[in-house]
Amino acid sequence: MLELLPAPPADPLWDLTAEYAADPRPERLNLVLGVYRDHTGVTPVMAAVKEAEIRLAERSGSKEYLGLSGNTAFNRAMLTTVLGTEALTARATAVQTVAGTGALRLLADLVRQTRPGTTVWISDPAYVNHRPILEGAGLTVRPYRWLDPAGRPDGADLLEDLREAGPGDVVLLQGCCHNPTGADPSFTLWEELAGLAEANGWIPFVDLAYHGLGDGLDADLRPTRMLAERLPEVLIAVSCSKNFGLYSDRTGCAVVVGSSARALRHVETALQNAARTLYSMPPDHGAAVVATVLEDERLKAVWLAELEVMRRRVTANRTDLVAHLAALGHEEEAAALARQKGMFSMLPLTPERMRGMRHRSGVYGTTSGRINIAGVPAHRIPFLARGIADALRAPSGAGTV
Ligand SMILES: Cc1ncc(COP(=O)(O)O)c(C=O)c1O
């Protein structure tokens, strides 16, 4: 039977990671995946996480099944952290998921169970996994333009496209630090989007994967909280992969803000049913760690301080890259990079020039032009800037090893 399987498309990001691993040049730089690395190039276990893990290991716990909603202390802590006020948490329910990806998939499933054939609007460009996840759940996907010609998401195009989203449609918005562009709307534009949703009856579906790494935790969550305050229904996929550094522990949460207690009870059961048929229950370890950190004021303060150090490092990397690029004569490109936020930057390089940069300088980003700013050790920024400058200047973009 397996002979019948047509060759499936390979995942481009993991393919590039394998190409990087096979590249013998010691100076090569892997900026493909969205992973934070400290100044030594290591993705650290945060001190607050480590301490929580020690506490959990010392507790004579049990590994009995937790139930379909996962770790309930984690779910409570996530509601409070994301929504901020009691008034909002009272209008919401949360189910632990297998990281942010699991939350996206479970919420997509919820939409399909509620209204099969729903149209979900995603940004163009979008996070590479948005379309496959939504289509995999049986939903119809339509793109809306994200950037105006100046590379800002405040162009008329975005609003013009979303004016076509109608009642019952769902609009997927990244809450902060847009992947892949690093370009976020102003708060005024967020308010315009809320107004459009109110007027036309579409439901915001917020993907929160990088909160804390843009302008700070509360500032990054402000648009999501504003949407939840103004609109009757909001879906929120939360990932703890980046801001707790729990990438491999697959920790996340599906949050739904709803208009009635009855609807929220149905939502929780529908999310549980979706999880039951996909993986039954999420793994507990990461969620137990996050709950331990967030329930302890001292540990929470340690985590917030560490998150702030990470955020500042990412910001400092970008500022440094901007300065080096400008010094190499690329002021315009540097100014565009300076406007971006979070772990990613979108370089003004064609796929051909991105490939050329990979071959010529050993700088690995995605062919779409995205690089992970948070993955560069600080002392390698001049090397990265030179690689980008060479790629910008190369006559055809092509390069040889
Ligand atoms: C925008 C966005 N959403 C969701 C995710 C999923 O994160 P995870 O499943 O690792 O928590 C990512 C990961 O890169 C992302 O960039």
Image (spheres, rainbow, N blue to C red):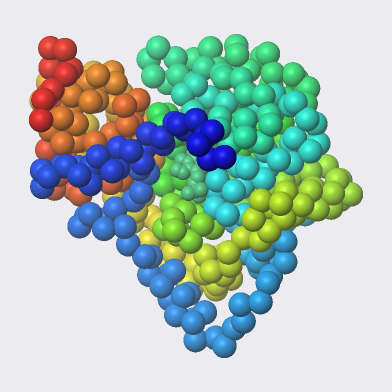
Foreground residue among 274 and 43:
274
Image position of 357 (left or right of 92)? left
Q: Residue at x 62, y 81 (%)?
A: 62
Residue 393 visible in image: no
Q: Residue at x 41, y 47 (%)?
A: 213
Q: How many marks?
A: 0
- The quadrant holding residue 208 is top right
Measured as percent of width and height from the top left, residue 294 is found at 55, 66
Foreground residue among 192 and 52:
52
State whether residue 395 is above or below residue 274: above
Residue 400 visible in image: yes
Which quadrant of the rendered structure holds the N terminus? top right
Measured as percent of width and height from the top left, residue 80 is found at 64, 57
Image position of 119 (left or right of 210)? right
Q: Residue at x 56, y 18 (%)?
A: 144
Outermost residue on the right side: it is 262
Foreground residue among 242 and 194:
242
Q: Residue at x 28, y 43 (%)?
A: 18
State whether residue 295 is above or below residue 249: below
- The quadrant holding residue 376 is top left
Which quadrant of the rendered structure holds the C terminus? top left
Measured as percent of width and height from the top left, residue 110 is found at 74, 41
Measured as percent of width and height from the top left, residue 46 is found at 38, 65
